Amino acid sequence: MPTQKVNAWYGWVPDRPDYRDKLYAAIAAPPKKLPRKVDLRRRCSRVEDQGQLGSCTANALVGNLEFLQKKAGHRVTNLSRLFVYYNERAMEGTINDDAGAMIRDGVKSLVKLG
């Protein structure tokens, strides 16, 4: 994907197909009646501005980890989005470019390197 197209999508690069991929299939039936509103703000960390950097996958993954820390009742650590973004690009061979990244590589980075 050309760099200018990547930046137009804030850095998301579609994952390459992987034979281990599984299609999502909901296991449980949805509730018959949904709540009128849901507010998750108390569990969310502060909003981060990635600016013009194509680091959206790292921002999404780290924001999710911080949310899960709060949900589990742990003290939230301000995790490094740039650490994840660097490692995503290292896996993809694009360290010297603001090339965006595949979310799969972001997950791999978190599993391998924390």
Image (cartoon, helix red, strand yellow):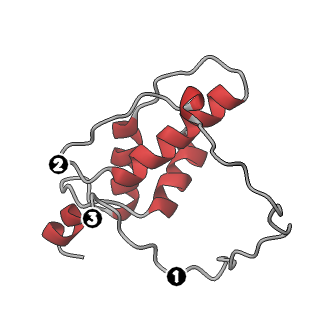
Q: Which residue: 73% across, 28% down?
A: 72
Disc 2 element: loop
Q: Tell me the tag on residue 17.
A: 1
The picture places residue 79, in percent across and down from the top left corner, at 46, 29
Is 32 left or right of 19, judged from the image as shown?
Answer: right
Q: Counting other residues with Cα less than 10 Å from the Cα at mark 1, is it few (<14), some (14-19), or many (20 or more)?
A: few
Separation of disc 3 and disc 2 at Cα?
10 Å
Upstream in the sequence, badge 3 or badge 2?
Answer: 3
Disc 3 element: loop
What's the residue type where badge 1 is placed? Pro
Quarter-wise, where is residue 37 in the image? top right
Q: Are marks 1 and 2 in contact (CB under 8 Å)?
A: no
The picture places residue 5, in percent across and down from the top left corner, at 19, 71
Upstream in the sequence, badge 1 or badge 2?
Answer: 1
In this picture, is 23 found above or below 32? below
Question: How many numbered marks, from 0 up?
Answer: 3
Is 111 left or right of 48, judged from the image as shown?
Answer: right
The picture places residue 67, in percent across and down from the top left corner, at 58, 35
**Which residue sits furthest right?**
28
What's the residue type where badge 2 is placed? Gln
Mark 3 or mark 1, whichever is nearer to me: 3
Residue assigned mark 2 = 52
Quarter-wise, where is residue 114 in the image? top right
Closer to the camera in the image, 18 or 31: 31
In this picture, is 60 found above or below 94? above
In this picture, is 101 found above or below 82? below
Q: Tell me the tag on residue 9.
A: 3
Q: Tell me the tag on residue 96.
A: none
Q: Which residue: 41% across, 54% down?
A: 57
Q: Which residue: 40% across, 44% down?
A: 59
